Each structure stands twice: as structure tokens, then as C-alpha cells.
Amino acid sequence: MFIDILAQKSRLRRVNTVFKICATIILLIIAVTASHYAVGMLLAVLLAVLTIAIGGLRLREYMTALALPLGFLLAGSLALLFELSPQPNGILSVQIFSSWLSISEDSLARATLVASRALGAVSCLICLSLSTPMPALIGALRRMHCPELVIDLMYLIYRYIFILLLIHHDMRLAARSRLGFRDYKTSIRATAAIYTNLLSRSYLFASKNFDAMESRCYDTGIRFLERK
Amino acid sequence: MMDILTLENISYCYDDKRLALDNVSASFRAGERIAILGNNGAGKSTFFQCCNGLLRPSSGKIFYKGALLGRSKRELLALRQGIGLVFQDPDSQIIAGSVESEISFGPMNLRLPQADVAKRVDQALEQMHLDGYAERAPQYLSGGEKKRVTIADILAMQPELIMLDEPTASLDPENVAALERTLAKLSNQGIAIVIATHDVDFAYKVAERALVFAGGKIIADDDICEIFAAESILTAANLKPPLVYEAFKALRSKFNLDLAMPRSIEELCACIERI
Ligand SMILES: Nc1ncnc2c1ncn2[C@@H]1O[C@H](COP(=O)(O)OP(=O)(O)OP(=O)(O)O)[C@@H](O)[C@H]1O
Ligand SMILES: [Mg+2]
């Protein structure tokens, strides 16, 4: 939950969340409708500077958060870059059996535009998630009149991600400390046991958790204090 | 004084084979401090959940402030507002993404105005020595810190009776001492305190009365000094008397003392001074 930890320590955390959501949506629209590749590039640089310089994150942390979406993005644009044609054309061509795999000016322009749009959009979302802890985001969605049920589910899912990760982590450590992963066979067996256990534990956990909510007079709608 | 909570012949079983609670009766008055003692699996947590209306006893009656508890949601809500329960495992109690919102969950459910909720949250944070933790995320807290958050959760609801399941299990000595002070203060305000614990020294210091559970039954309900004096109860429940109690007993038989039984190390030292 790397992103969560970064969001908790960002200095942009205190900026009004509804404002951040609206700004993100507007920038997102600008990014995906841009007709020039410079727009996406500019957005990516600006938002990175914002998150790092004002938010106070490290460049390495920002790049780690961006690495995964960036990987997908590059793989996707590579596919757009090449086109299959019967004769060689464009800037670069490679023969494959009887046809040619080539990069034309057209496909180059298209690939850069799509990549830069996607880069801009991803930067918007990463910037939001690195500056806003999840609970604040959910609270803002409630104020923006998102349905009650969806909000409750979001709170619970957020909490449960950590619980399940924690239980999973602890069980793995416990299995390892008892030499549960010493070779291939025991690893398979330990992993199976851990996941079976995780399932039954999470059932039990959910019912315990609901009891605890009821014991604190939970009726309908999860509500927390939101200070100005 | 009127009883806050009375249980009459309560039984409960999780599965059909064995009774987890077997015909249990007890009652709690305002301002009382009661320890619940007993082995692992004796039925203490089950008892708490019945008192809070989370488990429905298979037989028996519960009276809240003299009125028989029914099945309606309104009655259950009233019961849970008056009787706060701190769970044994903090992780099964915590649901929010920050300490402050976690503590505000109960008061918000009482439908109090924002300003009151904020005041109660601040007060509870201070009582549990959690100043500065308000914005921390519970998933990154230590075991003892989580335990303190769950106690603050219930303090913020200002119940008339607080049930704590193993409150000292993961606390350091300083926080145990702070908890003792908080509980004493609450008890002076007329709030009843019920503590399930394996820490007999803590129980002896904090409580005046004790219920002893064994195999789902209450085998003793008496002044805590009387309980530790009764050899048969101690063996039946595998209990060991507190250190202060044992030490004073040894001193008393040696020096023929006529002093009141000390409750804490400090009081014991004072007794030794007077010999
Ligand atoms: N969810 C459950 N399903 C089935 N049996 C249960 C469940 N919870 C508890 N029990 C059984 O009920 C009995 C009483 O359990 P309980 O949790 O009340 O004990 P306890 O006195 O709180 O013990 P501890 O000191 O270990 O917390 C135990 O024998 C236990 O095995
Ligand atoms: Mg228990």
C-alpha cells in the first residue's frame, strides 16, 4: 500500500478535496481531448513538479508510483507505432515473411499523440491519489452526493484491504518462520493453506467487525466527523 | 441505587453440543468497578456480547435499567448506547481510515451535532493519551496504540457502563497506569466499569467486586478480597492471588498486623513502613 503511505504524508493532503477532484476531472478532460502531443507532456511535467515540489514527495517515490502505468502505456503505444503493409513505406520497415512491418509518419504522429494523452491522464490520477488519502476522497464523494451504499462499501473495502493484507502478511511470516517455504513442495502446500485460511478468516472477521459496528449503535450509513 | 444492567439465568451456545454460558445471573450498579476473572474459554467474551445485545441468549432475561430487553431495534440501540463494549481484538473493532474518524464513529451514530462530536473526540483523545494521533491511520499503529484507540472509541460515546475485554493485554506499564487513573475518574463520575482480564494484579488494584467464570458458569460473585481468600474458588478457576495480596498475607501472619488490606504496591509499602 505504497500509494496510501505517500498520500498520508503529502503536504497537499490538506487542500480541499472537492477542489482537487474537480481540478483532476477538468485536467483529465484537457489531457484526453488534446490535439497536440505537447499538452500531455506539459501536464505530466507540471503535475510531477506539483506533487514533488509542493507535495514534498521524493522523485524516486513518484517514479515508483508511476512505473506500472507507464509500463502499460509504453507497451500500448509500441503496438500503435507499427503497422502492417504489403510494401515497405515510411521511416523504417522490417520484412516479415511476405509483408512489411513499418513505421510511417502517420503512425508515428498517432502513437505519440495517444501516448502523450495517456501520460497526461495517468499523471492527473496519480497526482490526485498521491495527494489525497482514501478516506478524504470518500468523504468528498459523499458531499458530492454519491449514493450512501456506495460510500459505505468504499469505506469498508478500504479498511478490509489493509486487514486482509495484514492477515496474509502475518500468516506468510508465521509459515516462513516454521520453514513453510523451504522447498517447492512445502511452498505449494503452505500457500494453499494460507489462502484457505484467509477465506475463512475473512468471513469470521467480517461478522466480528459488523458486531463491533452494531455495538456502537450503527444503524444506516457510515458517518465520520469531518472537521472544517 | 438502581441496577443499570441485570441478567437472569442467561444461557448461550455457539453450537448444539456445549453451553458457552450456562445459566448465568449477575447485576451491575452505577459507579461499581467489577473484574471478570476466569480461564481461557470460560465464557467472558461471550458474556460481554450477550450484555451488549450482540448475541441473543438462548434462554434467560436481560433487564436494562429495570426494563426487560425485547427484540426491537429501538431497545437494542438504547442498550448499546448505555453499555459500551471494548472488543478483545482491536482490529475487529476499528473501521475508519484515521484515528479521529474512528473515534467519531460512535458519537456520529448517536446523531449528535458536529460540534458535540468534535468535543467528545478531543476529550477521548486526551483521556487515552492520543494527542497528536488524530490524523494517523489505524493500519500503521502498534498493537497497544490500537487498543487505546478502541478504548477511546467507547469513552467518546459516554456510556453508563463500560465493558472492557482484556484492556491491558498489549499496553506498556505507563499506559496501564494511565488507564487505571482514567477508570478511577470515570467510576467517580458514576460510570460502572466491568473488566475481563487475566491480569490479577490489575484487577485487584482497580476492581472492588469480582465475578469468577469457569466452564460457562459464574462460580463466585463477591468482594474481590473475599474471592482471593477462598481457596476453593481459586483452585476451581485456576486463579493465582495478586502479588500484593500474597505479600501482605505473609506479613500479616508474621507480625500479627491489624491493618486494612493494601490494594497497590504503594499501599503495601506504606503498611511495611508502619510495622
Ligand atoms: N464464534 C464461536 N463459535 C463457536 N464457539 C465459540 C465461538 N466463540 C467462542 N466459542 C467457544 O465458547 C467458549 C467461550 O468463549 P469465550 O470467547 O467467551 O471465552 P473467554 O472467556 O473470553 O476466553 P479468553 O480468556 O481466551 O478470551 C469457548 O469454549 C470457545 O471455544
Ligand atoms: Mg475473551
Image: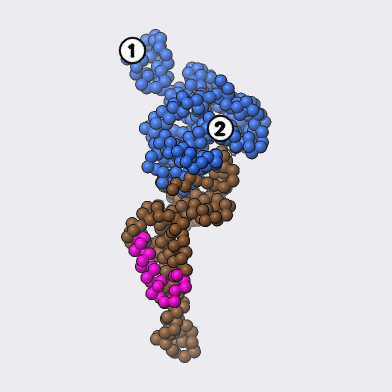
Chain colours: A brown, B blue
Tell me the quadrant of the picture where the N terminus of chain A can be found: bottom left
Mark in the foreground, 2 or 1: 2
**Ligand 1 picture quarter:** top right
**Residue A68 placement: quadrant:** bottom left
Question: Which residue is under mark 1?
Answer: B274
**Secondary structure found at label 2:** helix
Query: Looking at this view, is B185 or B262 the one in front?
Result: B185
Can residue A145 be seen in this snapshot? Answer: yes
Please report, as a chain letter, where disc 2 is located.
Answer: B
Question: Which residue type carries mark 1?
Answer: Arg
* Residue at the spot 43% in from the left edge and 59% down from the top edge: A20
Across the whole image, how many numbered discs are drawn on residues? 2
Question: Which residue type carries mark 2?
Answer: Gly
Image-based side of A71 in relation to B47, left or right: left
Q: Residues within 10 Å of mark 1 (few under 14, many from 20)?
A: few
Please report, as a chain letter, where disc 1 is located.
Answer: B
Residue A113 numbered tag? none
**Secondary structure found at label 1:** helix
* Residue at the spot 46% in from the left edge and 65% down from the top edge: A26
**Is A48 within the magenta?**
yes
* Residue at the spot 53% in from the left edge and 24% down from the top edge: B30
Q: Earlier in the sequence, mark 2 or mark 1?
A: 2
**Is B215 within the magenta?**
no
Residue B218 lies, in percent from the top left, at 58, 25
Magenta-colored span? A30-52
Residue B179 lies, in percent from the top left, at 42, 31
Question: Which residue is under mark 2?
Answer: B82
Residue B146 lies, in percent from the top left, at 44, 41
